[in-house]
Amino acid sequence: MFIWFVAGALVAVPMVFESPDLDVRIVTVAALLPIAEGLIGGPWLLHTLAGAVLVMVVVMLGTAGRRSQRRRWLGVPIGIFTHLVMDGTWGYTALFWWPAGGIDQLGGSALPEFDRYPGTLGLEVLGLLACLWGWRHFGLSQPERLRKLWSEGRVEASRDR
């Protein structure tokens, strides 16, 4: 699964937060980060609530006193939380609530997002449809809006829908 997470980061997150300082590029990369755990025999920490909270704490402490940097880098934990919601990790109780569900829950199994094949193909199609809808909703056919997405990571609802 790839497009499903991109759709969540690029379409759903901006609609929920409606923040002009939200960089959807950072949110999108962060929403895809947990997939990389598959390369190291995951799921690991990025598939747990504790991991997402830890990333948020690091961002909050690392940006203390720098408000604009904080707003920008909060996209990392937001993206990871988005991934947790969209891949249904919360349905894997012991993994999601690690370490409360047992410390041996990390690694050595399939990632939740790939554990539901062929249903994941349906989610990819839904993700593609959501991205196409978002393209129109955010007016990305207008060159200046598309340029703003690529250069600043910002999107806003189009009035020309």
Image (tube, rainbow, N blue to C red):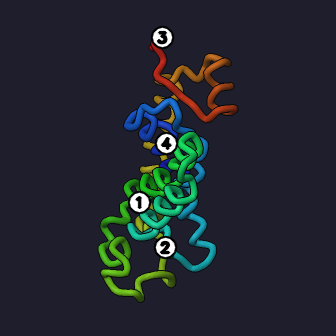
Disc 2 marks a residue whose amino acid type is Leu
Image location of residue 49, percent across then percent down:
38, 67
Alpha-carbon span between mark 1 and mark 2: 11 Å
Of tags 4 and 1, the one toward the viewer is 1
Please identify the residue farthest to the front as the structure is shown. Answer: 65
Disc 1 marks a residue whose amino acid type is Leu
If you read the primary sequence from the N terminus, does the residue marked by circle 1 or circle 3 appear first? 1
Image location of residue 83, percent across then percent down:
45, 56
Mark 2 Cα within 10 Å, few/some/many (few <14, many 20+)? many
Residue in view at x 57 percent, y 71 percent:
37
Of tags 2 and 4, the one toward the viewer is 2
Image location of residue 132, percent across then percent down:
51, 31
Mark 4 Cα within 10 Å, few/some/many (few <14, many 20+)? many
Residue at which label 3 appears: 160
Pointers 1 and 2 in contact (C-beta within 8 Å): no
Alpha-carbon span between mark 4 and mark 1: 14 Å
Disc 4 marks a residue whose amino acid type is Ala
